[in-house]
Image (cartoon, rainbow, N blue to C red):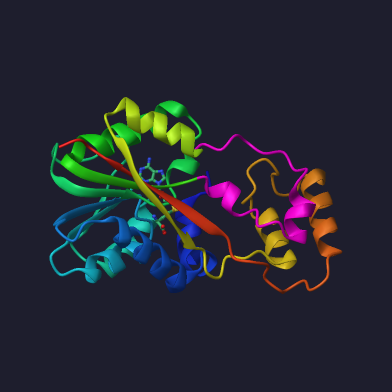
């Protein structure tokens, strides 16, 4: 996993900024019933999405939680009094206290299935009967948009997707959550250019290609030969899955 304490300062700008947050929020809200009054945004990061959720509907009280101190500080600056530092595997919230729980871009980080299962278990626990858990799935696959950059990257070593939809459905089922819809949002501003991808390689974004290794530099050299070094290719589209706790 990236060191999110180091990543915090550049996180928003490198993840599509407010445009991405707006797209994600709009899609989340499309899944969330207007009657919901309590939402927990788990692994809220800098709070860029959390703040939009909090201001979108006057009747919806939103709390964000994240494990990384620098992320918690940034989110707290955005939403004072509404952010807690917490591990999503052991949430400090009462059982059945929330109408909605969200995890945007968390499960793909958790390589150990036991960690993913613990997160989904906790999200299910804090949901009230009838409540909704909404999460991103298949994140890494979304970044492959079929561009020339992706063609260069195709032979790279990859770890299995920790947030593969069928696995998330299985975790959810184990904790009594039933599939209840799916939507997507555009990762506006996240299309890869050759140059930005070289920079990502050299800062460890591709976990199986450590910075400085000869193999990593071979991929960088191939990317450097592509045309239009600074032209972002097509934006990725990310999938959100919703699960309901039976009422
Ligand atoms: C890719 S960021 C997503 C942030 C935010 N949801 C967004 O969409 O901008 C992943 C976040 O997960 C947090 N995180 C990683 N493991 C965690 C855990 N076990 N419990 C809580 N947060 C965690 C990181 O600190 C980071 O802020």
Count numbered badges in the picture: 0
Residue 137 position within the rendered picture, expressed as x and y whole percent measured from the top left: 47, 45
Secondary structure mostly seen in the magenta stretch: loop
Magenta includes 117? no
Please give the name of the residue rendered at 59% of the width and 65% of the height, measured from the top-left corner: 235
Q: Answer above or below: position of 47 versus 208.
A: below
Please give the name of the residue rendered at 35% of the width and 64% of the height, measured from the top-left corner: 25
Residue 140 in the figure: left or right of residue 8:
right
Magenta includes 152? yes
Q: Quadrant of the C terminus?
A: top left
Q: Which residues are magenta?
A: 138-162
Q: Quadrant of residue 231?
A: bottom right
Residue 132 in sight here: yes
Residue 100 position within the rendered picture, expressed as x and y whole percent measured from the top left: 23, 49
Residue 67 in sight here: no
Q: Answer above or below: position of 57 versus 102.
A: below
Please give the name of the residue rendered at 59% of the width and 47% of the height, measured from the top-left corner: 141
Residue 27 position within the rendered picture, expressed as x and y whole percent measured from the top left: 37, 61
Residue 3 position within the rendered picture, expressed as x and y whole percent measured from the top left: 50, 49
In the image, farthest residue toward the front: 181
| The one of 138 and 246 positioned closer to us in this rendering | 246
Residue 63 in the figure: left or right of residue 163:
left
Q: Answer above or below: position of 195 versus 165.
A: below
Q: Answer above or below: position of 137 versus 162.
A: below
């Amino acid at each position: 996993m990236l060191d999110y304490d180091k990543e915090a300062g550049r996180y928003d700008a490198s993840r599509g900024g407010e445009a991405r947050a707006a797209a994600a929020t709009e899609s989340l809200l499309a899944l969330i019933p207007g009657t919901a009054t309590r939402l927990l945004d788990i692994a809220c990061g800098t709070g860029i999405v959390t703040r939009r959720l909090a201001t979108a509907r006057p009747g919806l009280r939103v709390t964000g939680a994240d494990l990384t101190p620098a992320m918690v500080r940034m989110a707290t600056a955005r939403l004072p009094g509404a952010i807690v530092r917490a591990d999503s595997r052991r949430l400090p919230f009462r059982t059945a206290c929330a109408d909605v729980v969200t995890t945007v871009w968390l499960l793909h980080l958790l390589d150990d299935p036991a960690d993913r299962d613990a997160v989904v278990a906790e999200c299910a626990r804090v949901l009230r009967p009838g409540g909704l858990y909404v999460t991103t799935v298949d994140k890494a696959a979304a970044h492959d948009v079929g561009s020339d950059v992706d063609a260069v990257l195709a032979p790279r070593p990859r770890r299995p997707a920790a947030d593969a939809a069928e696995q998330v459905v299985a975790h959810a089922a184990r904790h009594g959550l039933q599939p209840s819809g799916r939507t997507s949002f555009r990762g506006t501003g996240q299309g890869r250019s050759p140059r930005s991808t070289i920079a990502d390689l050299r800062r460890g974004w591709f976990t199986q290609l450590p910075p400085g290794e000869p193999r990593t530099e071979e991929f960088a050299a191939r990317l450097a030969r592509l045309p239009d070094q600074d032209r972002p290719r097509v934006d990725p589209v990310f999938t959100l899955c919703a699960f309901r706790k039976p009422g």
